[in-house]
Amino acid sequence: MGTITFVEHDGTPHQVELEDGSSLMELATNHGVPGIDGDCGGEASCGTCHVIVDDAWITTTGTRTDLESQMVEMSPECGPNSRLACQLRASPALDGLTVHLPEFQM
Amino acid sequence: MKRDRVIVVGAGHASAQLCVSLRQGGWDGEIVLVGDEPSLPYQRPPLSKTFLHGTTTLSDLLIRGPEFYEKEDVTFRHARVTGIDREAGTVALDDGDALSYDRLVLCTGARPRPLDVPGADLPGIHALRDAADIEAIRGTLRTARRAVIVGAGYIGLEAAASLRKLGIEVAVLEVADRVLQRVTAPEVSAFYDRVHREEGVDLRTGVGVAGFEGDGHVRAVRLTDGTKIPADLVVVGVGVLPNVELARDAGLAVENGIVVDEHGRTDDPRIFAAGDCANHYDARYGTRIRLECVANALEHAKAIAGAICGKQKPISALPWFWSDQYDLKLQIAGLSTGHDEVVLRGNPADGRSFACFYLADGRLIAADCVNRPKEFMFSKRAITQELSPDRALLADPDTPLISLLQTPARSAP
Ligand SMILES: Cc1cc2nc3c(=O)[nH]c(=O)nc-3n(C[C@H](O)[C@H](O)[C@H](O)COP(=O)(O)OP(=O)(O)OC[C@H]3O[C@@H](n4cnc5c(N)ncnc54)[C@H](O)[C@@H]3O)c2cc1C
Ligand code: FES
C-alpha cells in the first residue's frame, strides 16, 4: 500500500513498506532501520524515536503535540518538524513520506 | 562451512535487543533464541498498565514482529533450557534436545518473589510478571469486586490504578511505612499516597500479610495487625528474584545476579548474561549493580553484541524507568542511591505535576518527574553531562531548563 522512507543522519535511505495502523516507530524497528530505538515500546515515555518530517510533508502529518514537544525540545537536534515516530500512525495518506533521523537519540 | 552459533536463553527485552544489535554489528552466524514462554519477546511494562484493563492483545506487544526474526534469520525455539555443559559447549533443552553454542547469552530475567504465608497458593492469588499471569487476572475481572494488592512498589501501584479504572474496589498493603520506599524520596511517596487515596484506594502501610483465607478460592486476606480484608482477587507484587540457577549450576559466579564484567561477560569468556538476571560492573557508579528495567536490559544487550562482534564498548547508558498510574506519567532518570539533597520543582503536596531532583555533592544524579516530560529529558542530558545545576534555578519554575544545560559544569570543590 505504499512506502515510507527513513533517511539516516549520514544520508542512507531506508524504504519501508507502509502498514496501515502501525506507528512509524514500529515500522522502522520491525524493518531494522538503525537510528530509531523505541525503547519504551511506543508510550511516548523515552524519546528515542525522534524523527524530523520532511518539509514537504509536515502539513500532511501535522506538527507535534504538546507532549511530544516536551519530549523532543531538549534535544540539540530538535527542529520545527521534529516528532516522535511512535505518535505518528501510518495511513495511505502517508504514502511517499520521507522523514530524517537525528544523529543521536537521547 | 559450519556457521558459528549464538544461543540466547530467554525471550525478553534483552534477547530481542541482542538479535537486533548482533545483526547490526555484523554477526553473520546463526542466532537461536530459546524461550520458555510461547511468544516471541514482548513488552512487559504494559502488562500492569494498559494491558490489564485494555483490549490490547499479546501480538500488539511484540517488541519486533515475526517478519523481523525472519528477515534477520533468527530461529525461535519454544523450550526451556535445563542445563549448560561448558566443557562440551552445549545447552540441554527440556524437550530432550541439546544444542551446541559458540557464544551463549543468558537473558533469563527474574521471577516473582513468592509470599511465604499460609494460603498463598489459593486460586485467585496472582503474580504479575508475564502474559500468562495477566491472562489469568483478566479472566477474573468480570466477576471480581474486591481486589487486594500486596506490595506498593511501581508494579503494585500500577495494578491498583488499572483495577480502579475498571471500578473494582482496591486495597493496597505495604509492609514498609510508606509506598515506593525502596526507590523514592519521602516527598514522592507522600504524593503517590495522596493520589491513590484520592482515587479511592484503601491504602495501608506498615502492615504485612499473615495469610490468606478461602475455600477453593481466596476470600480474605489476614493482616499482621489482626484485621481481615475481604478479597476475591489478590495480586502479589513484592519484588523479584533473578533467575540465576542455570549459571550457578554451571559453576559461574553468582551474587545477587549472574556476575558479569563491564562488557556483560561472565568468568567464562564464551558466556554472557544480560538484563534483570545480570549483575554488572558499572563504571559510571564505580560499583556492581543489578537493575530491573528495560533500559538496563537494552544496554546490556548492546554491550554484549559489541563484545561478540569485536567492537567492545562498556555498559554505560544512564538507567531510566517509567510508570503510568491514572493520569500520571512518571519518568525517572538515573539512580537516586547516595543522594544527599532533594530539590523540588513544582509542589507534590498539591496538584499532579512536579519534578523531584536528587543531588549528591551538588551534582544531579537522578530525577523523578511526574507529568513533566521536559524535566525528564533535561535530567537525562544533565546527568549524563555530570552537571551541577544551581539549586535555586532548578527549583524556579520560571527558569527555562534548557538554559541550565548551557551552564558549564561546576568543578568539584
Ligand atoms: C508488570 C511489569 C511492569 C514493568 N514496568 C516497567 C516499566 O515501566 N519500565 C521499565 O523500564 N521496566 C519495567 N518492568 C521491568 C522490565 O520488564 C524488565 O526489567 C525487563 O523485562 C527485563 O528484561 P530481561 O530480558 O532481562 O528479562 P524478561 O523480560 O523477564 O525475559 C526473560 C525471559 O526468559 C525466560 N526464561 C527464564 N529462564 C529460562 C530458561 N531456563 N529457558 C528458557 N527461557 C527462560 C523467561 O520466562 C522470560 O520469558 C516491568 C516489569 C513487569 C513485570
Ligand atoms: S518509542 Fe518511546 S517515545 Fe516513542
Image (cartoon, rainbow, N blue to C red):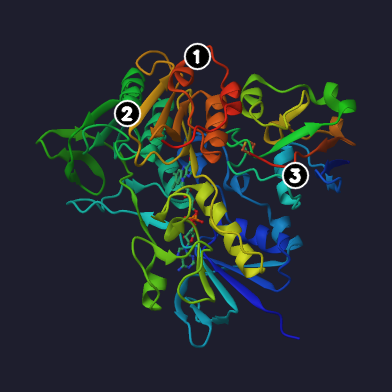
Which dot marks residue A28?
Answer: none
- In the image, taking residue B369 as reference, residue A44 lies left or right, namely right
Q: Are marks 2 and 3 in contact (CB under 8 Å)?
A: no
Residue drawn at point x = 53 percent, y = 26 percent: B375
- In the image, taking residue A59 as reference, residue B356 lies left or right, namely left
Q: Chain of mark 3?
A: A
Residue drawn at point x = 34 percent, y = 41 percent: B338
Reading the chain from its start, which is encountered first: label 2 or label 1?
Answer: 2
Is label 3's Cβ within 8 Å of ligand 2? no
Query: Are labels 2 and 3 assigned to the same chain?
Result: no
Q: Nearer the viewer, residue B207 or A76?
A: A76
Query: Are labels 3 and 1 assigned to the same chain?
Result: no
Q: Nearer the viewer, residue B356 or B340?
A: B340
Q: Chain of mark 2?
A: B
Quadrant of ligand 2 in image = top right
In the rendered image, which residue does mark 2 sit on? B189
Say what amino acid the circle numbered 3 marks. Answer: Leu
Q: Chain of mark 1?
A: B
